[in-house]
Amino acid sequence: MLRAPIKDQPERKIPVIYLVLLSLVIGSLTGLFGIGGGFLAIPILVLFFHTPQNKAAGTSLLIIALNCATAFVAKIKFWSDIDWHYPLIIGITAILIARISSALAPKAPTIHLKRGFALLLFTIAGFTIISNLLK
């Protein structure tokens, strides 16, 4: 994300075998470290397959939505144990912040958004490494 944007290169179709291998690696790392795969999938799609940033982000969000829906349905027998106030507060807050952010994003310089995202990724990686070393 800190690299200069790739220019004048058409989006490459991902061969099915690469897609399966990429999914297995990202899924394994997600399960191992307990973190979302989007932080791996987006840079790989953008840097190696020249996927436009917005398409890569949309793909990542679709995968997140499918994972959430699967987990939600899989845990149906535990729904009665959930205090639904907290998920509702989190959901409503997320929707409000997303609406505000989407209104402000076009006004923010893209370079700042990319650098901020890269900084966030480095921070999360550092936190994950340090917290695992302290265990």
Image (cartoon, rainbow, N blue to C red):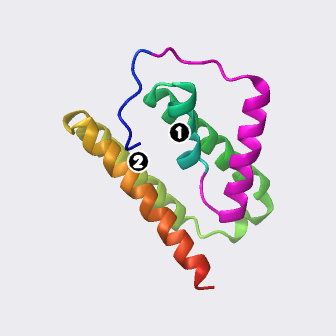
Q: Residue at position x 59%, y 70% from top?
A: 83
Q: Quadrant of residue 93?
A: bottom left
29 in magenta: yes
**Where does residue 15 sit, x and y in percent of width and height?**
73, 22
Query: On the image, numbered disc 1 is attached to which residue?
Result: 42
**Where does residue 11 sit, x and y in percent of width and height?**
53, 18
Q: Earlier in the sequence, mark 1 or mark 2?
A: 1
| Extreme-bottom residue of the structure | 134
| SS class, disc 2 | helix
Front of the two marks 1 and 2: 1
Q: In this view of the protein, can residue 96 be seen by the observer? A: no
Q: Quadrant of the C terminus?
A: bottom right
Which span is picked out in magenta? Answer: 9-36
Bin the neighbour count of mark 2 within 10 Å (Cα to Cα): few under 14, some 14-19, many 20 and up.
few
Kind of residue at badge 1: Ile
Residue 28, above or below 44: below
Q: Residue at position x 57%, y 46% from top?
A: 40
Kind of residue at badge 2: Ile
Q: Quadrant of the N terminus?
A: top left
- Report the front residue among 13 and 60: 13
44 in magenta: no
Bin the neighbour count of mark 1 within 10 Å (Cα to Cα): few under 14, some 14-19, many 20 and up.
many
Query: On the image, numbered disc 2 is attached to which residue?
Result: 95
Left or right: 104 as drawn, with respect to 120: left
**Where does residue 56 sit, x and y in percent of width and height?**
52, 32
CA separation, marks 1 and 2? 22 Å
**Where does residue 43 sit, x and y in percent of width and height?**
51, 40
